[in-house]
Image (tube, rainbow, N blue to C red):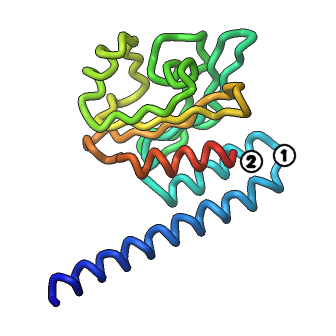
């Protein structure tokens, strides 16, 4: 009975966490539906994603397919607003997400995964220990990517975080 009680308490706690996550996503969706300015939308993405997961290192990337360039309207490094200069299409993790239109979750060994994928290691700031990125899509068209990383600890992100970030991107 003690084991069953503990399991029930654990299930109840998980249910409460999931309910709070759904509340956050619904609140974000309502706010996004009333916004037309790209800067407001990007700030909303960051605000609500920060309530769902670690965003100490976070960015939103927009892809210009005509110019094959990446711009970064929001960059957060170590919980501080930062900047990344616009760049031409590259062979980094962000471009990989844009090209494949698929999310990418790297639990640990980020540098090894980059090498295994045949990508370039483009370091902006402190090297990542854990990395998660998802594409921003409108139908089949790629608009950019949202990514978060942790520079201090591996295994910060898991499949559930990936699902949450995909939900954020889809609502955006």
Q: Is residue 24 left or right of residue 160?
A: right
- Image location (x, y in percent) of residue 92: 45, 17
Give me the C-alpha separation between circle 1 and circle 2: 8 Å
| Towards the viewer: 125 or 38 | 38
Q: Residue tagged by mark 1?
A: 36
Q: Is residue 30 left or right of residue 128?
A: right
User: How dense is the environment of label 2, judged by Cα within 10 Å: few (below 14), some, or many (20 and up)?
Assistant: few
Q: Specify the quadrant that holds the N terminus.
A: bottom left
Quadrant position of residue 11: bottom left
Going 61% across and 60% down the picture, which residue do you hit?
A: 25
User: How dense is the environment of label 1, judged by Cα within 10 Å: few (below 14), some, or many (20 and up)?
Assistant: few
Check whether the beta carbons of the residues at disc 1 and disc 2 lie within 8 A of each other: yes
Local secondary structure at mark 1: loop
Q: Residue tagged by mark 2?
A: 40
Quadrant position of residue 27: bottom right
Relative vertical location of residue 88 with respect to residue 140 in this rendering, above or below:
above
- Image location (x, y in percent) of residue 141: 71, 25
């Amino acid at each position: 009975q003690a084991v069953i009680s503990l399991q029930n308490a654990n299930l109840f706690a998980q249910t409460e966490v999931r309910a709070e996550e759904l509340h956050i996503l619904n609140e974000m969706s309502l706010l996004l539906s009333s916004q037309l300015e790209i800067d407001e939308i990007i700030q909303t993405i960051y605000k609500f994603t920060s309530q769902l997961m670690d965003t100490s290192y976070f960015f939103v990337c927009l892809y210009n397919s005509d110019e094959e360039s990446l711009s970064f309207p929001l960059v957060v490094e170590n919980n501080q607003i930062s900047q990344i200069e616009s760049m031409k299409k590259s062979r980094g993790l962000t471009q990989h997400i844009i090209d494949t239109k698929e999310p990418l979750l790297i639990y640990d060994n980020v540098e090894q995964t980059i090498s295994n994928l045949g990508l370039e290691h483009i370091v902006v700031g402190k090297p990542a220990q854990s990395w998660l990125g998802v594409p921003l899509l409108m139908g089949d068209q790629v608009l950019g990517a949202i990514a978060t990383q942790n520079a201090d600890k591996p295994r910060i992100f898991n499949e559930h975080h990936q699902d949450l970030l995909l939900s954020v991107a889809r609502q955006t």
